[in-house]
Image (cartoon, rainbow, N blue to C red):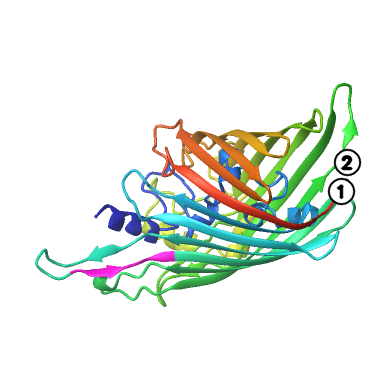
Amino acid sequence: MKKLSILFLILSVAKATGQDQERVITTAVPFLTIAADARSSAMGDIGVASSTDAFSQQWNQAKFAFAERKSGVGISYTPYLESIITDVALLSGSYFNKINDRSAFAFSLRYFTLGEIELRNTFIEEGVLVKPNELAIDGSYSLKLSEVFSMGITGRFISSNLEIPQLGNAVQDGNTFAVDIGGYYRGREKAYDNFDGRWVWGFNVSNIGPKIRYDDAGQENFIPTNLGLGGGFDFIFDFDNVLALRAEFNKLLVPTPRDFNGDGVIDATDNEEYQKIGWFEGMFTSFTDAPDGLSEELKEITWALGAEYIFREAFMLRAGYFNESEEKGFRKFFSLGAGFVYKNAEIDLSYLFSTAQVRNPLENTLRFSLTFNLGREYYND
């Protein structure tokens, strides 16, 4: 029954809330916003400007042009709502390959399963098992435009299968496509008084694409188009010790639910007006459409801080903090993690501690990632 309630919640995407003061932006296919790898999740869900790894596809595909190995393979497993459900999870797989010193391509797959749900009208009736799921398949290309800056583009196919046949509705698979555009700057290493250092920054506009529809006559729902901006500094103390500090800001480029008719309540009529906003128009109006003006727009921006300590490129310690406004989702958490490298393989682990009154679906969850870095080495400095 718990899993069925979760499914209903996901099917209620892009629905305005009943209180005018609760204008939380919701979208379809929210699994696209879950950090799929343990390294990024250990640093507070930071990835736009972190160093390149096999999971860069989700965060900023432009980073692949700066990959230091010929190719890489990554697989990860993220349990979801583990404290109450055992078979809901996000699985991810990715592969990248450097074409030459200046360019690379990559592919990835993210699969979100809600497990098995048994449906029945009465207790004596034989149940029917359904397995709702969602997936995204990506392909990207990245290119260095100079020795310190690259850009990349990703094409993505998204499919969401949330059909519940017993409800007698016309729900069907929802399909759409999206594009990501990103840029990544990796400065040259410079000598300071007691250490060497390097500045980095990046941006990524992800999931630019049409709305998704689950039936022929029903409403279309926005997908989580997002603008991410990040930057930081690498403290290179010596050959064995490196400390990377990062900060990142994200904003959904999705319109804010609001009271269109001025009756003080966001109701079905307001939702109809909300649905008339096109996805392309919504990307640009999302910067100025919050009813309370700039103060509310700023509340729609999440921020995160992360750190990664690397010892001899063989052992990593990570920590991060993520913050979201209480009025816009109330996700606040600390995260910790570690990584271990043996030959060409790397194992990463992460753990999340919620600091908000609203429980995080990934709270007290241990996440795993496995990466294989293969082929010749490339030097980017």
The residue at the point 35 percent across, 70 percent down is 163
The magenta span reads: 127-133
Q: Residue at x 77, y 34 (%)?
A: 233
x, y percent for residue 214: 42, 71
Residue 194 placement: quadrant: top right
As for residue 130 lying within the magenta part, the answer is yes
In the rendered structure, are the residues bearing label 1 and label 2 in contact, judged by CB atoms less than 8 Å apart?
yes
Residue 111 point in image, percent of width and height: 49, 62
Packing grade of label 2 (10 A; few <14, some 14-19, many >=20) is some
Dot 1 amino acid type: Val
Mark 1: few, some, or many residues within 10 Å (few <14, many ≥20)?
Answer: some
- In three-dimensional space, the C-alpha distance between marks 1 and 2, rounded to whole angstroms, equals 7 Å
Quarter occupied by the N terminus: bottom left
251 relative to 163 in the view: left or right: right
Q: Residue at x 28, y 73 (%)?
A: 165
Secondary structure of the residue carrying tag 2 is loop
Mark positioned earlier in the residue sequence (1 or 2): 1
- Is residue 77 one of those drawn in magenta? no
Say if 189 sits above or below 141 in the image. Answer: above
Residue 19: x and y in percent read: 38, 44
Any mark on residue 148, and which?
A: 1
Q: Residue furthest front?
A: 343
Q: Give the residue number, with chain letter if any, for mark 2.
A: 188
